[in-house]
Image (cartoon, coloured by chain):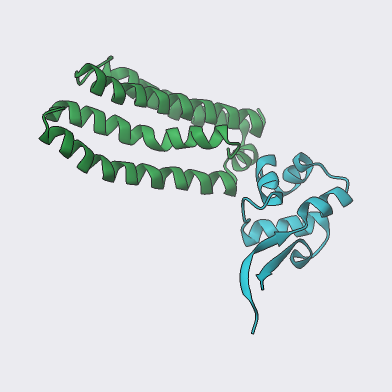
Amino acid sequence: MNSRTLTLIRNTSFSLLGLILLAYGLGVLVTGRPDPFPWWVTAGAGIATALAVSVASGLAGRRAAAIAWDELAREEWKTCLAFGYWVAVWLYPLFAVLMAFSMVDQVQAFAAMGTLTAASPFLLFLSKWLRGRF
Amino acid sequence: MGGQVAGLANRLRELRARHGLTQAQLAEQVGVSRKTINTIENRVFVPSTLLALKLARALDVSVHDIFALEEDG
């Protein structure tokens, strides 16, 4: 496996994970249920992503993995993580307002905030991938 | 006194072409992705000192031949 295949596996896995987490978070808000679909789908997607990237990196070898995670990729991923941090911070006041107006309850807020926070770095990753940065 | 530094200019595309290398070939030589070479050439990404030195070595020039501070005014 070469670095391009590894990059494709990583990019696809991260993007799918972001979309699944987003679907769960939005599903909570749209349906009003804390479990719009089974919780293990999100957990399984996270574990499957970690496994896919780790196994692919192992198969590709150290040099291909280093190319796939070169300094541009690391820099961009840091930006994605920083974005995730600020999303996590800003979700608190947002959900405080939603709860104050009884638009969501505590259980829904917990489920939505957790999954949307987790989704955010992967969604920015997807956006950067579509713009040719990964 | 010198002017304000506006950015980092580079001649990577020109020097790479002079060596008859594609972006992918240069990327392979220095151990990065083709995208990284492309974003450096397009001045979207500023490489680390380590990568700048590797590029200079691959193209058999000095770092100053590839990169230069661009001054404003």
Q: Nearer the viewer, residue A5 or B41?
A: B41
Q: Position of residue A71 (x, y in %)?
A: 58, 49
In the figure, is residue A22 to the left or right of B17? left
Q: Nearer the viewer, residue A70 or A118?
A: A118
In the figure, is residue A69 to the left or right of A87? right
Q: Which chain is green?
A: A
Q: Position of residue A70 (x, y in %)?
A: 60, 45
Quadrant where the C terminus of chain B sits is bottom right
Quadrant where the N terminus of chain B sits is bottom right
Q: Nearer the viewer, residue B17 or A30?
A: A30
In the figure, is residue A30 to the left or right of A74? left
| Residue A47 in sight here | no
Q: Position of residue A57 (x, y in %)?
A: 56, 33
Which color was chain B given?
cyan
Which residue is at a point 62% across and 31% down the rendered structure image?
A: A60
| Residue B49 in sight here | yes
Count all numbered tags in the image, as a single digit: 0
